Image: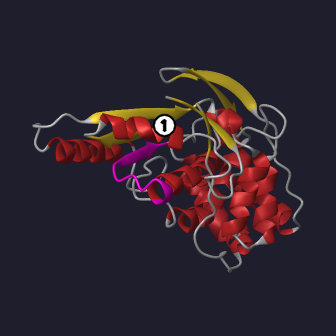
Amino acid sequence: MNNGISRGFRGGGHHSDLYGEIISLQNLVSAWQEFKTGKIKKTDVSSFAVNLEEHLFAIHQILKTESYQHGKYTPFFVHDPKLRSIHKAKVIDRMLHHAIVRVIDPIFDKSFIFDSYSSRRNKGTHEAGKRFRKFAWKLSENNTKTVWILKCDIKKFFDSVNHDILIGIIKRKLNDEKVIELLSTIVYSFTTKEGRGIPLGNLTSQIFSNVYLDVLDQFVKRKLQVKYYIRYADDFIFLSRDKAYLESLIPDLGYDQKSIHDVHHLLVFER
């Protein structure tokens, strides 16, 4: 199915010195403490820790002078259970990802819908499962009615993310040009094909995916007014006792530039 879905974020931009918060030594130290958890015995992390103070002051100075450049990635594969291509950034970059997410995540998170469960505090697969069971139990009226489910995912989502569109969405929420430039440096540091792709492996990719797919969530909840909808990363489901209603949603998710306001991008879903 070919589908186009887009919507601007609610509300105006955030008006504080976000860049100053991100690059502060206090935030960098806190980001390091979070990042090193469970990794300190790894060679690259332990080596970084030997001269930690020097590294933290160095990255602080680089960021202060706005001369930061993202390093290269090391690719490898994992099975979870599907074979996935992971791209691992250098320690200094991964630590900075933590510093960034610590500051910007709360800003974006409060505008997400309740039933978005991936990479969010107090959410996750367990909570998504509980919500699914709650919806199913309610719709089935204590297992006395049949409940139908429409399950979708986004074909090669991480590889397909459009860099310019992602940055454009971020600009609607953040008014700090230095932060936009910093995030752009990270976004454009990786490509699967020209102008597209975010790496599985970056902490920033988790928040970028939620920011990008919030346009889908808002379309489903506001335009389609679907009540029973849950999304986890690029997988999402609709529940209903009415099979025909779920089938009717499929063309509504279709790419229709006339009926969907402010379409930015063609997303390809697999039903």
Look at label 1 and name its amino acid.
Ile
Secondary structure of the residue carrying tag 1 is helix
Q: Which residues are magenta?
A: 222-232
Image coordinates of residue 38 in percent, x first then y, are 51, 41
- How is this picture coloured? secondary structure
Question: Would you say 15 lies left or right of 133 here?
Answer: right
**Would you place residue 89 above or below residue 262 in this image?**
above
Image coordinates of residue 32 in percent, x first then y, are 62, 55
Pick whichever, 25 or 115, lies toward us: 115
Q: Total marks drawn?
A: 1
Q: Is residue 16 visible?
A: yes
Task: Tell me which residue sits at (18%, 43%) in the image.
Answer: 137
**Would you place residue 82 above or below residue 260 in this image?**
above
Pick whichever, 17 or 10, lies toward us: 10
Q: Residue 73 appears in which quarter of the rendering?
A: top right
The residue under label 1 is 250
